[in-house]
Image: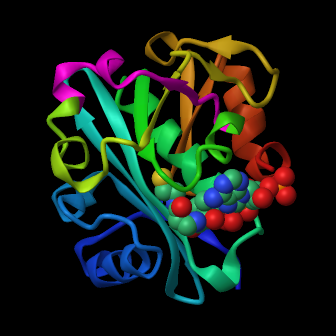
Amino acid sequence: MALTIEPATGDDSPAILQLLSDHGLPTDGVLEHVDTALVARRDNRVVGCAALEVYQDGALLRSVAVDGAQQGRGIGGALTMAALHLARTLRVFEVYLLTTTAEDFFPTFGFRQIARDQVPPGVQTSVEFRSACPSSATVMRTILSGMERDVVCGMQVDPAKAAATSQYNGKTYYFCAKVCKAKFDANPAQYVK
Ligand SMILES: CC(C)(COP(=O)(O)OP(=O)(O)OC[C@H]1O[C@@H](n2cnc3c(N)ncnc32)[C@H](O)[C@@H]1OP(=O)(O)O)[C@@H](O)C(=O)NCCC(=O)NCCS
């Protein structure tokens, strides 16, 4: 069955905790952010997760984990992209993370290493910063563009000024003109890879 990336629900909490502990990742505080967590689901089973902790001065991406038997198939990448999309949707454009295991995984998604003291105070209140992650963990940041790509014509669109939007598979698509929306709505699968 197809893989889906979707918002986590409270019922996913045990599976998320299990995935994190299977990989030795911190579980402290993650369930406080289940509203902004995502799961990868296959055959009704959670095979991956990622969570965004949103603060007034940025967001923390944490708990990116994929079932050992399912790794290397693009699931971790899809979860990371979906979490960054969620951040954009929430109008949060600076996303931070802490890692001791995957500093070479995240640069593909625009993350670059920074010094710990470059992390803004709100994000530093995360339990990951305060206690769950060692002080030797690598700190990374990506700065997102506020723009979305119109998948029909390729133009960059400011979501706040989009001429039209459509929902498809749980994601919002932004269009520069109504004609692009009409083309998309007629056959969304043609435009979504
Ligand atoms: C990191 C992780 C989420 C990647 O998930 P995934 O589904 O295997 O990733 P994808 O299939 O999207 O991407 C695979 C690519 O990432 C690379 N990659 C995977 N894990 C990596 C890691 N820990 N460090 C560096 N690169 C890694 C693979 O080598 C592969 O590279 P390639 O495309 O050049 O061959 C997964 O390996 C995992 O759960 N690791 C344990 C938990 C962890 O360390 N999470 C990060 C916490 S901050």
Please name the residue shown 62% across and 42% down the image: 106
**Most extreme residue toward the front, as rendered?**
136
Q: Residue 28: give x, y in percent of width and height.
A: 19, 63
**Residue toward you, 186 or 141:** 141
**Residue at the image position 80 percent from the left and 21 percent from the top:** 154
Tell whether position 114 is magenta. Answer: yes
How many discs mark residues in the rendered view?
Answer: 0
The quarter holding residue 71 reads bottom right
Q: Quadrant of the N terminus?
A: bottom right
The image quarter containing residue 111 is top right
Left/right placement of residue 87 relative to residue 72 reads: left
Q: Is residue 157 above or below residue 193?
A: above
Magenta-colored span: 109-123
Question: Is 89 a magenta residue?
Answer: no
Q: Is residue 39 above or below residue 190?
A: below
Displayed-image quarter of ligand 1: bottom right
- Measured as percent of width and height from the top left, residue 138 is found at 47, 38
Of 47 and 160, nearer the camera is 47
Residue 74: image x %, image y %? 74, 61
Residue 135 image position (x, y, % from top left): 31, 42
| Residue occupying the point 50% across, 19% down | 159
> Is 118 situated above or below 152?
above
Q: How is the image coloured?
A: rainbow
The answer to whether residue 75 shows anywhere in this view is: no
Asked if residue 146 can be seen in this view, the reply is yes
Q: Is residue 28 left or right of residue 62?
A: left
Question: What is the quadrant of residue 79 in the picture?
Answer: bottom right
Residue 171 horizontal side relative to residue 58, left or right? right
Residue drawn at x 67%, y 35% as measured from the top left:
107
